Amino acid sequence: MSGKNARPRNRARESGNESLQIRKTYKLYVGGEFLRTESGRADAVESPRGAFLANISRGSRKDLREAVRKARAAQSGWASRSAYNRGQILYRMAEMMEGRVEGFEKLLRETRGSTAAAARREVRAAIDRLVHYAGWSDKFTALLGTVNPVASSYFDFSVPEPMGVVGIVAPNAPDLLGLVSHLAPVLVAGNSAVVLVSEKHPLASLELAEVLATSDLPGGVANLISGRRDELVPHLARHMDVQAIADAGGDSGLSKLLGEDAAVNVKRVRRYSVRDYASEDAQGLDFIEAFVEIKTTWHPIGV
Amino acid sequence: MSAIPSLFDLSRVPPVDQVGIEERAAGLGRRSIKKEAKRAGIRLAMSMLDLTTLEGKDSEGKVRQLCRKAIRPLPEDPTVPHVAAICVYPNFVAIAKDALGTSGVKVASVATGFPAGQVPLPVKLDDTRRAVEAGADEIDMVIDRGAFLSGEYDRVTDEILAVKEACGAAHLKVILETGELETYDNVRRASDLAMAAGADFIKTSTGKVTPAATAPVVLVMLEAIRDHYLATGRRVGMKPAGGIKTSKQALHLLVLVKETLGDAWLTPDLFRIGASTLANDLLMQLAKESSGRYQNEDYFTKD
Amino acid sequence: MATEIDERAERKAAVRRFEAERPRIEFGTAWEYSPAPESADIVRIEKRENLFIDGKFVPSRSGRVFETINPATEEVLSEVAEGGEADVDAAVRAAEDAHRKRWSRLRPAERGKYIYRIARLMQEKSRELAVLETLNGGKPIKESRDVDVPLAIAHFFYHAGWADKLEYAFPRHRVSSIGVCGQIVPWNFPLLMAAWKIAPALAAGNTVVLKPAETTPLTSLALARICQEADLPPGVVNIVPGAGETGAQLVNHPRVRKVAFTGSTEVGKLIQRAIAGSGKRLSLELGGKAANIVFEDAAIDQAVEGIVNGIYFNQGHVCCAGSRLLVQESVAEKVLEKLKLRIETLRVGDPMDKNTDVGAINSRMQLDKIRELVACGVEEGARLHQSSCALPTKGFFFPPTFFSEVAQSHRIAREEIFGPVLAVMTFRTPDEAVEKANNIPYGLSAGVWTDKGSKIFQITSRMRAGVVWANTFNKFDPASPFGGYKESGFGREGGMHGLRAYVELS
């Protein structure tokens, strides 16, 4: 670099006219688009010490409705992708995340007060988790499926199929790793997802939307909504077009209400209280199995 | 190449599912036939019998004995009906005709190079004409299974048409030899073909090949007859033959007829059972029903 | 104008002539089956049947009883003790004790041997169980003898073998039992549903309190006797008959760790709501309104058998019944003609007669519901077809029925009738068939009929239903997982997947 190019910066500094940092506007991620809440409401996000960090959209029930609509529209197309292709897209998500490691680490430090080392560990773990599930895409069917030896002249087999639209109540912390840990297994099974991101620390999650948007993941397959749980959870739980909910919110009062409301359409609810998301126990086939249906097909054997 | 346009439209023949038809036939086999139903069924079966001898060692003496049995199956009980017909080789038609006189028992003759049917068409026609001239009321022809299985449907059709013409006033029963056709699809196809070509009866087997008149094969043919009747209004008869030895089997066949074709077919005019040893088992069961005692075969004449 | 009317009249007359001369098949009395009644003497039903708690038959604490009848004759078979809160509590505590002290400590292989023993005893008493099931529930003896009882036995045999192999079903996990299972079963397959519930629960080391349906308690009490004969440790299996209230007490009992319910979607939702937040495990097997799709290239006669088996099996009291027929327009007329013929040969009447195909409706309440929905179908403009069979004058009976010209929006096409009533709709293309089949809140089962292999795989995979029968219908096996999508419930019963509902993994 020549000194010529450096000159204007110096001049600016000298004049006290520093180049102002461009702040990010954090939006909802719905149907593959970055949208402000239709309600026009915003909530401020602060650092643990109380410093203003950013405003986020305080998602409304209409935003949620729109997210479910988009998730529904995208689900069958996503499910009909080949397992190989879904795996590649999840791996692509890991690649995109890798390119933004520093940004994520910075957000974790700022929003949760994580140490640099802890932030690095969490981001690495989140990337590893995506890679882990990318590899599951074309394997879980073989492990969750069975051929059933019935006592009559029929070929009988059971295979896992996606449930449909899955709501995810992500843990408040670890916001990034927790979200990825619940989103990836839901997606790899062919479901689409509507995620209520961490209420307390939403920024890294909303930043993840940029990874989703650039990973060849079809718009609408994963939707991220920020906002207040007590407002949003009942609408998610009562939504007739949501088939299942991963409830990792960690609020037992809200979980009970969620469980009650989920009965409106016999939603499958899996409640999680994961002690250590960084552990390998927080990943694997069980997380996928929770969001598949088992279909059994019979056919006669004859000529 | 066929001289006559094909009467047989392969595309209209429905497929048959092996497991489905076998389950249905087995289900009907579990009908419980007791008391009066059993007595009436046995008498009905006797009246439908085509009492058969088709052996290389057949002689005039054998045929005349069999004719006595046909006219009066149970010498001590004149209420037991005579059988429907005697079924013999062409050489014995005249003898049978003479022995049966005015009893009402008909003479059926196998013809057309029975049982393989592997002789030239002129020989088949000659065989048929001679049997008719000798007094046969009914001709049991065999189809050329080799031609059928190699897809020469027109040739099989033409042969049936020609034999039908050679029969004149005699009724034509067309033997499909279902044991060689092997699949139910073939049985259905051959049934439809034979009926389209003018068969008065369709018949399962020669008795020289096993399996022969199994319940599901009979059911496939009865369903073909029903569909032919509903489509054309023409009632074609049915004759299972081969391996039918017990009253239980015979009653099972009647159940198949009753529940597939209904009352109109429960008559010797439209349903026959081809068998050689069934008659005595019918008589033994009848005796058991009236006396309550289990029977010994030496109390019944072997002819 | 006049000529136009004449022409129309002439056309009508021609149609009438054609109809009159149309070939007809008559199923008459040329050869009639004699009555073939199974003997009821083989079973002894106590005048008073008690609760089975902690290995003993005991009256209810409240002394309350209810009558159980034979729906085919309306005669009272027995007075049955009705479980109340104290009884449910006693049963749950007995089960908890048995779980803690005996059953969960037993070597798994020994648990398996008890379950094998139950299966064998059931085989020895299979005729008695079949007769009892038919007397109490109204289903044809042919079905209880050939389907319900053998399948119930097979469920015990199948699960007995799992007892010491659970770690193979859940690799990388430590498998343990859950505890007391509160199980509620319906009246349509009383013994079979009890077997579906009890066998996997016991194999996995749990103990159970089972509530049979109010109208059909007798075979589960017979099963209790078999548990006694098998020397099953007291409290491992408890049977507490009663109605909805008893069920609610069981579901809400704080020491019940797992609830398994088979019944209506309405009650299933109440249960799901009631136990939310309690940490209790739940599996639900609820209602259905299955589509049976017949394509033009199907084996039509077997499809007709499948339609009949799909809707008239067990009087249509089947959650997975094929109650909506979707038939391709090009073959609709032919299929309906065959169906009309076929229902004429269904023998409706005395369930104890071995030749009866369609028995009694389980209760007056159910009969009223069926009648109401059928009346509604007529009112909504669908075309009614019914078997011309004569119905017995006593007891609860309904003739095999189907409606043609049904629209998706008709109530008979939306609501579960749970009776021998089929709604027939037509479609033109595979996409339309799939869309209509899935266009219902239920997702328990579906049927697909076509002779084309690649079509089977595509259509079955597009069905949003847990059990899909291709070129067959209403087939069951303990090795084959059964359960629904959507509002038909969650969890599977049978097969390796069925075990999941009864184990704790760590």
Image (cartoon, coloured by chain):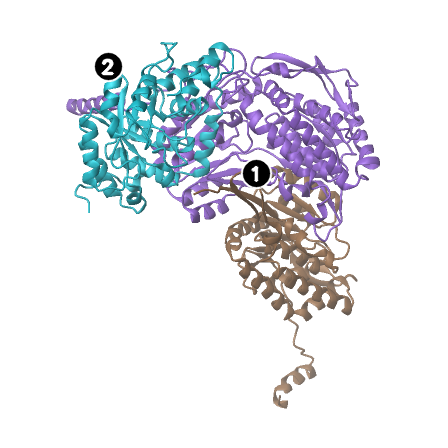
Chain colours: A brown, B cyan, C purple
Tell me the number on the disc at residue B102.
2
C240 vs B35, left or right, is: right
- Which-is-in-front pick, marks 2 and 1? 2
Residue C372 position in % (x across, y down):
50, 21
> Badge 1: few (under 14), some or many (20 or more) residues near its Cα, within 10 Å?
few
Q: Nearer the viewer, residue C323 or C139?
A: C139
> Badge 2: few (under 14), some or many (20 or more) residues near its Cα, within 10 Å?
few
Q: Chain of mark 2?
A: B
Residue C144 position in % (x across, y down):
58, 25
Q: Nearer the viewer, residue C206 or A121?
A: C206
Identity, as a three-letter code, of the amino acid under mark 2: Thr
Identity, as a three-letter code, of the amino acid under mark 1: Ala
Q: Residue at x 63, y 71 (%)?
A: A99
| Residue hosting label 1 | A151
Please say if C45 is above or below C342. Answer: above
Query: Whole-Å distance between the Cαs marked 2 and 1?
Result: 56 Å
Q: Nearer the viewer, residue A254 or C388?
A: C388
Residue C350 position in % (x across, y down):
52, 16
